[in-house]
Image: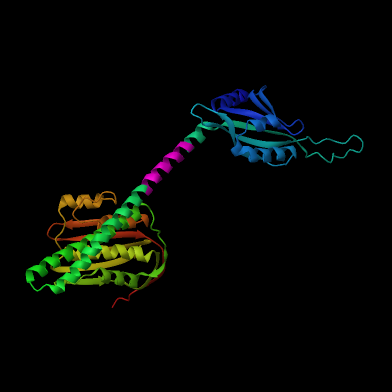
Amino acid sequence: MIVADFRTILQDGNIRMATYSPDSHTLSIFKTIDHVQHSLTQTRCMTLVDEYSQNKAMHILNDMDERVDKEMRFDIRSSLALHGNYPLHFMFSFIPIHEREQQAADNGQRTADHRRVVEYFGLCQDITDQKTTDYQLLQEAKKVQEVENTKTSFINNMVQEIRTPMDAIVEAAEQLCPRLDADKNCTHCDVILKHSTYLLHLIDNILYLSRLEAHMIEVVKKPCDFVDTFTTYCVAGRLNNDSVTFTTESPYDQLILEIDAQKVGNVIERVVENAIQHTHHGFIRARYDYIGRRLMISIEDTGDGIPKEELEQLNAQTANDARTSRGLGIPICKELLAQMGGHMEINSEEGLGTTVWITLPCQATTIKRKKMV
């Protein structure tokens, strides 16, 4: 029963038994348990091995000829090829077979070479399909990478081509404005400067987003005191808007986190900027807490709010799907957070305001909460 099962396994798994004799330097491949299908000399073996595997095969054969006492597992690429010009690949697994212990006839002592390797026994499996699939996947991955590199290069070049004349327009408008006395002409210059500056900002965001998508921006986690980081980037994102009350709330005197402070700060700054732009009265409140190894940040405003359909788009939006009127800020923030293992959620009601929730898994090394008064 066991022999029958073994034969079935050999047949169904495209596996053959194999032996190698150091004495005769011969590799034997068995079709069945008791029938040799191929008996190959070492020279014949080497002629069937592809140049890619020549050194490996010679090293293995030398080890077996020297009767090295160890298990051996290796794959060999053959010089023979299937249809489609894919070379045959074989996986060999050998274990050493030792000479049986014998009693010396003259003195009853064991022979000195009772552990001598006399043969290697193992299995030979055809793994051509697996190797062919791996090769095809590798080629497809290379094609995808080439397309990605081409796209990134194109975007970078286009951004540079657009930015150069835009810089010239801004510079010319800045020099022209002081020379004009008419209020109407000055107004036109202000419009040119305003929209040119916005276009330059948009170009920078396109370039930054393309680098993010190509994973060209590395996330580097270092210990930082998030109490200072939070305040610094909230202030950096705040614009001049005297009609809105801006407050930050921190429940800690010190909170040392292992994060990429610059990138987390970039997200905070962008969200605060967006809140300022869409809030004309009331307040903006930014706060955070560290709960269950997660940094949780909320930025709440009493601004214009977001229509329901657009809100659904924003929450489902990815870096490759930036089709809302909110620009590229949200896609950039979401992609940055995703690459750091976090995520963003937006709650809003049109006309009543918006709250952005940012969640980021991280490790705290020092936690000092403020004392309750």
User: Within the image, what quadrant is residue 190 found in?
Assistant: bottom left
Q: Is residue 71 left or right of residue 237?
A: right
Name the residue rendered at 63%, 30% in the picture.
48
Residue 349 part of the magenta-drawn span: no
- Which corner quadrant holds the C terminus? bottom left
Vertical comparison of 315 with 121: above or below: below
277, above or below 319, in the image: below
Residue drawn at the location 20% of the way across and 52% of the way down: 324
Decide: is 81 above or below 166. above
The main secondary structure of the magenta stretch is: helix
- Residue at image coords 7%, 71%: 183
- The answer to whether one can see residue 69 in this image is yes
Q: Which of 129 and 188 is in front in this view?
A: 188
The x and y percentages for residue 290 are 34, 65
158 or 47, which lies in front?
Answer: 158
- Look at the image and give the residue range highlighted in magenta: 135-149
For residue 247, which quarter of the picture? bottom left
Q: In this view, does 320 lie to the left or right of 29?
A: left
Task: Tell me what residue is drawn at x 43 percent, y 43 percent.
Answer: 142
In this view, the residue farthest toward the top is 35
> In front: 105, or 186?
186
User: Residue at the bottom extreme?
Assistant: 373
Is residue 197 visible in this depiction of the protein? no
**Image position, residue 79 (x, y; %):** 59, 31
Q: Quadrant of the N terminus?
A: top right
Residue 109 on image: x %, y %? 87, 40
